[in-house]
Image: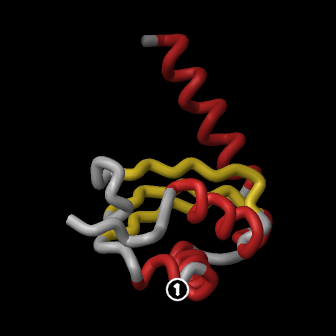
Amino acid sequence: MAHSGVTADSLKTAILERLQADHVEIKDLSAGCGQMYEVVIVSSLFKGTRLLARHKLVNEKLKDEISRVHAFSQKSYTPEEWLKKQQQETKEGATA
């Protein structure tokens, strides 16, 4: 399969710059060919917005990159939501 031209690093840079992200996690699920990505984005731009609006914002800001890959899955959080999620996961891990 041909490479999409989108790398995890280029995608991370675009997310950090265009979405003013505080934290980004990217998984290339395509074995390195750049066709399938799963991303976690933490940004203050998501404050006060619902999930659909967040996804629309991400899709708009990354439309060039998304158009060149086969699959793009995103999870978006505000910094407060991300902190709460991390604390919950830590708590659950401590009790397991």
Quadrant (top left/top right/bottom left/bottom right) for the C terminus: top left
- Residue sitting at x 68%, y 56%: 42
Q: Can you tell which quarter of the image residue 3 is in?
A: bottom left
Residue positioned most to the top: 95
Q: Find residue 24 and report its horizontal and vertical position in percent.
A: 63, 52
Q: Find residue 68 and report its horizontal and vertical position in percent.
A: 40, 80
Give the left or right position of residue 24, taking residue 30 as reference.
right
Give the left or right position of residue 60, taking residue 47 as reference.
left
- Residue sitting at x 39%, y 68%: 72
Quadrant (top left/top right/bottom left/bottom right) for the N terminus: bottom left
Mark 1 — residue? Answer: 63
Q: Is residue 8 visible?
A: yes
Above or below, 61 relative to 81: below
Above or below, 53 relative to 34: below
Query: 44 or 37: nearer the eye?
Result: 37
Q: Can you tell which quarter of the image residue 41 is in?
A: bottom right
Above or below, 45 relative to 77: below
Number of labels in the image equals 1
Query: 36 or 32: nearer the eye?
Result: 32
Q: Can you tell which quarter of the image residue 14 is in?
A: bottom right
Q: Find residue 2 and report its horizontal and vertical position in percent.
A: 27, 68
Q: Residues within 10 Å of mark 1 (few under 14, many from 20)?
A: few
Q: Amino acid at mark 1?
A: Lys
Q: Is residue 52 visible?
A: no
- Residue sitting at x 45%, y 78%: 66
Mark 1 secondary-structure assignment = helix
Q: Find residue 4 and report its horizontal and vertical position in percent.
A: 37, 71
Give the left or right position of residue 5, taking residue 45 as reference.
left
Give the left or right position of residue 7, taking residue 24 as reference.
left
Residue positioned most to the front: 2
Query: 50 or 24: nearer the eye?
Result: 24
- Residue sitting at x 44%, y 48%: 27
